[in-house]
Image (tube, rainbow, N blue to C red):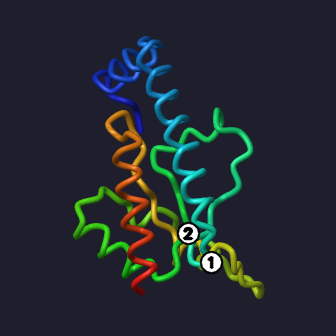
Amino acid sequence: SPIKNFTKKLIYFQLKDFKSRKKNHDIRKINNKYYYSKLKKMNSKDILLFSIQDFNFQNYLEFPVLFRKKEKIYKYLMRKGFDLKKIHYFNCSKEFKSKYKCLNSERVEKEILCLPNHEKINSYYIDRLIGDIKIFYKNN
């Protein structure tokens, strides 16, 4: 469908403002590195991080992580006031008639939670979130 002029203008002004885009990218990059290092240090069998090769390239809107007991930790962290995205990836392999199961796709669909990453997220917020994740897995 055709793009409305209003939408075109919004895109144009967002692309034109290189300074804000660069700042936003840099904040997300710092947050990605911080999330990754903090979660990696937990060394938990209940948490799986995706391998990140280049933090410049991995400009996520959220920071995706696989959690065992996804539903329970999601409810726990939402009660604590954290901004999470629970449904992010759909296992499209279900739609194709194939004799092969895509186990990784199924696992990602069942276990992924996306942690927030934008300009309002800082190390204090991430530390609180990681602290509550530790508490959850210690008690469950």
**Circle 2: element type:** strand
**Dot 1: few (<14), some (14–19), or many (≥20) neighbours within 10 Å?**
few
Q: Where residue 5 sits: x, y (%)?
A: 31, 21
| Residue at the spot 40% in from the left edge and 50% down from the top edge | 126
Q: Check disc 2 and give the amino acid type.
A: Leu
Numbered mark located on residue 45 in the image: 1
Q: What element carries label 1?
A: loop
Res 54 quadrant in image: top right
Instruction: Identify residue type, mark 1.
Output: Lys
Q: Residue at x 69, y 80 (%)?
A: 103
Whether 22 is drawn above or below 57: the answer is above
Label placed on residue 132: none
Above or below — where is 91 with respect to 22?
below
Horizontally, residue 33 falls left or right of residue 10, namely right
The image quadrant where one finds the N terminus is top left
Distance of label 2 from label 1 (alpha carbons): 10 Å
Residue 63 position (above or below residue 17): below
Residue extending furthest right? Answer: 100
Left or right of 112? Residue 83 is left
Q: Mark 2 points at which residue?
A: 66
| Quadrant in the picture for residue 128 | bottom left
Residue at the spot x=45%, y=18% of the render? 15
